Image (cartoon, rainbow, N blue to C red):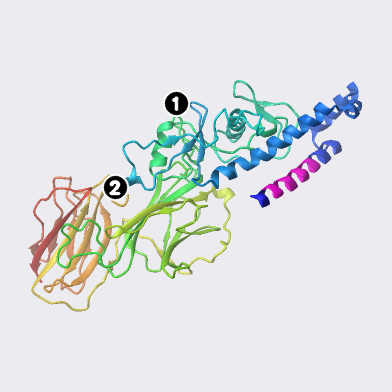
Amino acid sequence: MAWYASSYFNSTLIGIQNQLTDIMWANDTKNRDKIDQMMESGGMFNMSGLTDSSWSDLQSDLKSLFWGSMLPEVWESSEQPMHPFILSATYWLLNANYPKCPSCISADWQPFTTLKGGNNETLDGERWGISLEDIIASSWSGFLKNGKRNGYSMQSGESVVVDEDWNLQDYGWPMLGNIQTPGFFNFTICLDPSEAKSNIMNLVHPPCGAQPKDVNDAPGGQNAAGYVPGWCTIHITQFQPDQYKQGTHEDFEYINPLNEYQLAVTVMGGDNTPLAYATKQPVDGALEIDSKLPHPLIVQDNYKGADGKNMLSFWYNDQWWLEVDQQHHCNIGAFDNGKREGACGFTCNNPDQDPKKSPPRAPPSNPVKAFQGTGTPQSFGNAKDYKKGKCELHIRQYQQNEMSNDLNAGTYALELTLYDDDAALIAYTEKTNRAGGDAKNTVNIQGPLKWLVTCYSGKDDKTVPTCKYGAQDLTPGNKGWKNGLRDFGVKFNC
């Protein structure tokens, strides 16, 4: 904190020096006009008569600038970190009260809470030289200058402030608004309380994206590439290896019959709209996920942490981070019943503002293109031989539009596993999206068997998948859905 304060004073002195130089050299047209006016009226000669109150005003302004620059740092590094944002429906400065996980929310949980010291009694404009109105005015004016988008950065020589009606006014002189200058405070603006609540519940940082949703009109905010830039997020589900019962998956909520980890990853834009789904699949060293973004997202699962354990690592253009990185707001839980899940965020600019750059750590040289649920899936764990007799096909069907199952897309999906007569695993086909009732668009599995096993989803939730092995009909009996999925086991002659 001492280093931060020292850096602030040095940068402030340099900034004032540069600003005075810019004004006196009159490089800007507005500055020349103002100096002309002062010289015409004799105002320049009155500067020698500055009173003690004038120097007191200067000291007051410097106090405001100092404590104003320190305040976000204090909230972020407090014992219980605060997440300030502004709800413009009420012009309140609030704390985003993130839960530990989406499933950990209690009945009395509140998404918005007060900030420590973020009230009119503490921030009265006197003691620290900062008022709540200063914070909101600066953040809101930056939001307006940025076309009602978050992420505005304060510009040198800024002469705009908001008036009493919260509209922008240009008064000509730089930093006339002191700490109310646009972008001095840069807290996220939320326009719709429901959007902020939903994002906080789902651990999305910050609580509203670059283009927040408006209560009155639904903004597009999308660029020509089809995504909202700013702060994108990824949702990750990781499955532990060897999570299955031989011969059946009954009562096994999360399955992974392979001896390697599997991942399901969803990439979301600045407005929390999904841009790509990488369905549940083995990582194979590293996955490269293409989306509407100008660069692929790369995920690797074998970075060695300080304790020697493998960690997830991520790359997007010139950004690289680990699953514990707080600058990327990562919140990934521990394994529970065979899987764990969480989210991270990253900067995703417009294509013309995001040229290809090198990250601080080189990405994997040959990542595997992630399977996004459509097209031909891969089969894994294929045995070269098997015990003939009665084999079993296990079918896991995922319900369409059921977002609780690893963010399943808006169609049905099938995941297939084959066992031989000794109940040994002989083949596995990854989770694959298939439209219900499409008999020509099958999900297949074979392994060492003589013929291909073909399956397709039923046309609706009441219809079971249809499967065949040669002339044998492997269609299972009907079963109900549980948490957006259901499991079937069918024995057949092999």
Segment tinted magenta in the rendering = 5-18
Looking at the rendered structure, the kind of residue marked 2 is Ser
| Residue plotted at (59% across, 38% down) | 186
Q: Which residue is mark 1?
A: 216
Q: Position of residue 126 (x, y in %)?
A: 66, 29
Q: Position of residue 111 (x, y in %)?
A: 41, 37
Query: Callout 1: helix, strand or loop?
Result: loop
Checking the image for residue 131, the label placed there is: none
Looking at this view, is 440 or 284 the one in front? 284
Q: Is residue 229 left or right of residue 268?
A: right
Q: Which residue is mark 2?
A: 404
Q: Is residue 448 left or right of residue 82?
A: left
Instruction: Name which quarter of the figure residue 173 lies in.
Output: top right
Q: Is residue 293 visible?
A: yes
Query: Callout 2: helix, strand or loop?
Result: loop
Q: Position of residue 492 (x, y in %)?
A: 8, 66
Instruction: Name which quarter of the figure residue 423 lies in.
Output: bottom left
| Residue plotted at (30% across, 57% down) | 336
Looking at the rendered structure, the kind of residue marked 1 is Asn
